[in-house]
Amino acid sequence: MTPTERRSRATEAFFGRRKGKPLRELQVERMTHLLPELRVVPEGPALENLADLFPTQVDRLRLEIGFGGGEHLVHRAGENPQTGFIGVEPFVNSMAKLLAEVEAKELRNIRVYDDDATQLLDWLPAASLDQIDLLYPDPWPKKKHWKRRFVSQVNLDRFHRVLKPGGLFCFASDIDTYVNWTLIHCRDHGGFAWTARNRADWITPFAGWPGTRYEAKAKREGRSSAYLTFRKI
């Protein structure tokens, strides 16, 4: 099966519930007025230059899939104002939390998508991203649900298509089976080279890593994390 054929296959949703506690009044206000301003709409032909999505000049483009509480995305956007970030998160409460931070910090280099990341990936132009971050994704721990893990040959094809030559795919998880799963899938795909040279490279957080609530929970529960970086070849 060719990469194009694999990409065209229907995929299941890779996320769980869409909404938690009822939103507060200010959160509803931001979801109503700010979200439409920041939302990427993957319809029609993709932009020739993704940098046009941003009101400020950017020279790098980075996608974070499943940003959760948004701690990492906000931190990176603040420290890298010349990088344009697209954050994907279908969970309404997490999106509301991020919008509050974007508004408070007046971040102009973040755009968001609040649905299935595969739809966005299929719309993005080829070789348009410098980096993709998949940090503490849902591990779907039951074996019968492993097919819903975001790392798959189908999605690695998607990553490989939209990353620029030499672009990075960064993955973090505290679930050993998912770490091994990702290493095996990237190896078998053939389009990604794991950059680690020794053990310290994958047990040490990424440069400038701010930590996330998922990482903190893992530490409290006695689990260590792995930080994997793959380069498109």
Image (cartoon, rainbow, N blue to C red):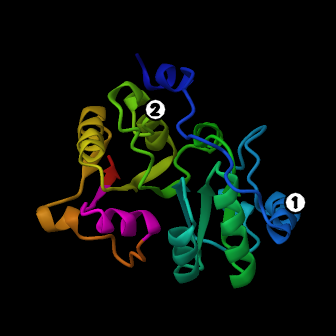
Q: SS of the residue at dot 2? A: helix
Q: SS of the residue at dot 1? A: helix
Type of the residue with mark 1: Thr
Residue displayed at 75% across by 39% down = 45
| In the depicted structure, whether residue 179 falls above or below residue 168 | above
| In the depicted structure, whether residue 207 falls above or below residue 30 | below
* Nearer to the camera, 94 or 161: 94
Q: Quadrant of residue 3?
A: top left
* Nearer to the camera, 194 or 225: 225
Residue displayed at 57% across by 67% down = 70
Q: Position of residue 138 (x, y in %)?
A: 45, 46
Question: Dot 2 surroundings within 10 Å: few (below 14), some, or many (20 or more)?
Answer: some
Question: Dot 1 surroundings within 10 Å: few (below 14), some, or many (20 or more)?
Answer: few
User: Residue 36, can we see it?
Assistant: yes
Can you tell which mark lies on residue 153?
A: none
To which residue does mark 1 refer?
Answer: 32
Which segment did they paint magenta?
212-229
User: First in sequence: mark 1 or mark 2?
Assistant: 1
Q: Position of residue 97 (x, y in %)?
A: 67, 67
Which residue lies most toward the left here? Answer: 198
The N terminus lies in quadrant: top left
User: Residue 108, can we see it?
Assistant: no
To which residue does mark 2 refer?
Answer: 148
Which residue lies most toward the top here? Answer: 1
Q: Residue 126 vs residue 149: left or right?
A: right
Residue 197 is one of the magenta-drawn residues? no
